[in-house]
Image: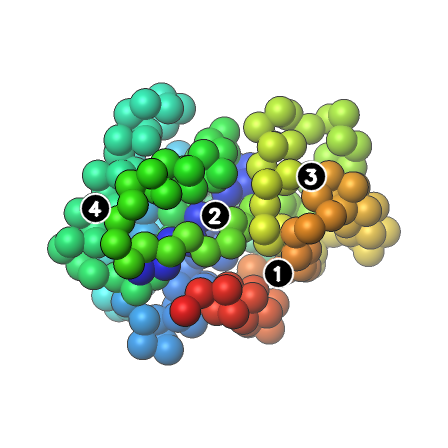
Amino acid sequence: MEVVIVGGLAGSGKTTTILRMAKIFNDAGRRIGIIVQETGDVDYDEDTLLEMNITKKNIESVCIPCSLDADIISNIKSLYEEFKPDIVFIEAEETVLPIRIKADLQRMELKDMHIAPIIIIVDASEFPLETDMLLRFTRIQIENANIICLNKVDKAHKERIAQLTHMLKKLNSYAYILELDAESDECISVLVNAVAEAIH
Ligand SMILES: Nc1nc2c(ncn2[C@@H]2O[C@H](COP(=O)(O)OP(=O)(O)OP(=O)(O)O)[C@@H](O)[C@H]2O)c(=O)[nH]1
Ligand SMILES: [Mg+2]
């Protein structure tokens, strides 16, 4: 079971990106599970999930670290036992650090579980261009990301994207930064390939 943790600010495009990736992996025959801390406007569309036979579990306790850990662990365990997914996507609420979820998952020592590169989604049309403007949790998310998606590039000026890329590289020179329009097939397949290369 591969676990793909997706973080980023509210409205950055996490749900859209996860659903698009899930569809591609599902079409390739992988069983998909999703764990989400529901806070946003755009919910996962139940019909779409049903069509793809995706099992979704909601975590209700947001911003309470202890119960959050317990929730993620119990949800991952039951998902694993009941559904045996090949890939589980975790959509983290914006203030939650994916690196922390990763550490909690690693402590579980669940057999057959592998943590995929951490994905952080950034809204390229709105994300601050100065490091001083970043909230602490956002900065930590960027610093610890393995893949940073500059999403909504369809809405952002080229100059802004270049400035943003420069700023993000200063914070994290190791991450793979890719431009994304989560609503375009071509962009999503680049992301899916990057994830597929890292998982088995
Ligand atoms: N123009 C544009 N809009 C996008 C793109 N990706 C997502 N959106 C839109 O942005 C809005 C927020 O997307 P979501 O996928 O719900 O974002 P989220 O990060 O899951 O949001 P929360 O769960 O509220 O934190 C929706 O209206 C999407 O349709 C993109 O690449 N381009
Ligand atoms: Mg969402």
- The residue indicated by pointer 4 is 77
Residue at the disc numbered 2: 6
Q: Which residue is mark 1?
A: 181
Residue sticking out furthest to the bottom:
28
The answer to whether the residue bearing label 1 lies less than 8 angstroms from the nearest atom of ligand 1 is yes
**Residue 193 in the figure: left or right of residue 23:** right
Q: On the picture, is 63 further left or further right than 119?
A: left
- Residue under pointer 3: 127
> Circle 2 sits in a helix, a strand or a loop, which is it?
strand
- Amino acid on which the number 3 mark rests in the picture: Phe
Residue 180's place in the image compared with 175, above or below, is below
Q: Tag 4: residue type?
A: Lys
Identify the secondary structure beneath mark 1.
loop
Q: Crowding at label 2, few (<14), some or many (≥20) Cα neighbours within 10 Å?
A: many
Question: Which residue is located at x 21 percent, y 51 percent?
Answer: 79
In this image, 74 relative to 125: left or right? left
Q: Earlier in the sequence, mark 3 or mark 1?
A: 3
Nearer the camera: disc 1 or disc 2: 2
Q: Nearer the viewer, residue 110 or 116?
A: 110
Residue at x-position 45% and y-position 34%: 100
Which label number is shown at residue 165? none
Q: Are marks 4 and 3 in contact (CB under 8 Å)?
A: no
Q: Nearer the viewer, mark 4 or mark 3?
A: 4
